[in-house]
Image (tube, rainbow, N blue to C red):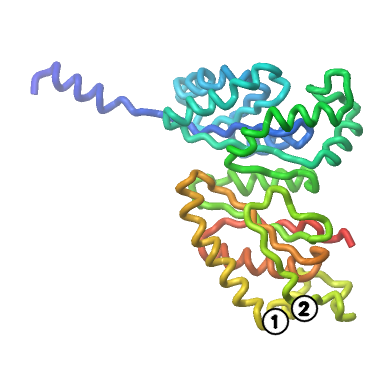
Amino acid sequence: MDEESRGEELMSSSVVKRTIDVAVVTGMSGAGRSTAARALEDLGWFVVDNLLPSLLPITIDTAIESGYLDRMAVVIDARGGRFFADTQASIAKLKERGIPLQVVFLEAADEALVRRFESSRRPHPLQQGERLIDGLRRERVMLAQLRADADLVIDTSNLNVHDLRRKIDAAFEGDQRIPLRATVLSFGFKYGIPVDADVVLDARFLPNPHWLEHLRDKTGLDADVNDYVIEQTDAPEFLDRASALIDLMADGYLREGKRYVTIALGCTGGKHRSVAMAENLSARLVRHGVETLVVHRDLGRE
């Protein structure tokens, strides 16, 4: 092999095609984008806030060329005004190029968002001199398709900043270790079904510990309540089938690029049956290799 050929071979072998992981954080104003961004920053992500959507591809290219970033999170929201329409086109361009990109959408009920805006005494960016609720409606219309296409939707209506950070941590920490992550969320049907649930399971077919005086004031986290619920005839089979259902769906989720699933498990008040069953379902999923976060949405509300 002559020197020229040897040099060309050495040059081609030294060229390594680089890419970086990208997270686009978006969603409703007041739903917790800043908290999510800080949580990602604490996990080692390089975070860019309020980037013009049209600049997303060139920003990612610059990060790749720099050679020292491997994860970048970009916060994009309605403050971009008419430029926000470029968001989906920019995301599509990056995905077409094979850039690993995930969209995180933060959601919240209007009532929760109104309370947050009123407490901060700040106007909504799309309020346009009208009522706050008018700005929220405009924003929901603007974000509808982005929400539908999101890889992860988090409803923060009943979450505090610490709960939200835990959800972000569960979704992004140690990203290469576990291919599918699950949030098992217990809730009470009388408080409403979680809007961010991918799967909803109903534990109300089991006898209610509320009607037993020695268990009424306890919760599903107490051993005697847990034992009472799990020892019911159909409880173990329910948990086995629920776990098998998630196993069945896992491969499909991953093929479709969905790496996070929220499994909502409800009873009447979210205090006894759903809490105990959520804890036990989580344990089964962990044994099957699914990294799991347990959240008890309505525990303590009664």
Give left or right: position of 123 versus 245.
Answer: right
> What is the count of numbered marks?
2
Q: Nearer the viewer, residue 108 or 292?
A: 108
Q: Secondary structure at mark 2?
A: loop
Q: Give the percent coordinates (x, y) of residue 59.
A: 54, 20
Question: Please, is residue 244 above or below residue 62 in the view?
Answer: below
Question: Please, is residue 103 above or below residue 194 in the view?
Answer: above
Give left or right: position of 71 versus 115.
Answer: left
Disc 1: CA contacts within 10 A as few (<14), some (14-19) or many (>=20): few
Q: Residue at x 31, y 25 (%)?
A: 15
Q: Secondary structure at mark 1?
A: loop
Disc 2: CA contacts within 10 A as few (<14), some (14-19) or many (>=20): few
Q: Quadrant of the C terminus?
A: bottom right
Q: Give the percent coordinates (x, y) of residue 194.
A: 73, 52
Question: Please, is residue 104 above or below residue 181 in the view?
Answer: above
Which dot marks residue 259? none
Which dot marks residue 207? 2
Q: Give the percent coordinates (x, y) of residue 11.
A: 25, 22
Q: Which is nearer the N-term, disc 1 or disc 2? A: 2
Q: Give the percent coordinates (x, y) of residue 273.
A: 75, 70
Residue beneath disc 1 = 232
Q: Nearer the viewer, residue 132 or 183?
A: 132
Question: Please, is residue 166 above or below residue 24 in the view?
Answer: below
Give left or right: position of 268 versus 261.
Answer: right
Q: Amino acid at mark 2?
A: Pro
Farthest left residue?
1
Q: Residue at x 71, y 18 (%)?
A: 81
Give left or right: position of 25 versus 2.
Answer: right
Give me the C-alpha separation between circle 1 and circle 2: 8 Å
Q: Which quadrant of the view contains residue 72?
A: top right
Q: Amino acid at mark 1?
A: Gln
Q: Disc 1 vs disc 2: Cβ atoms closer than 8 Å? A: yes
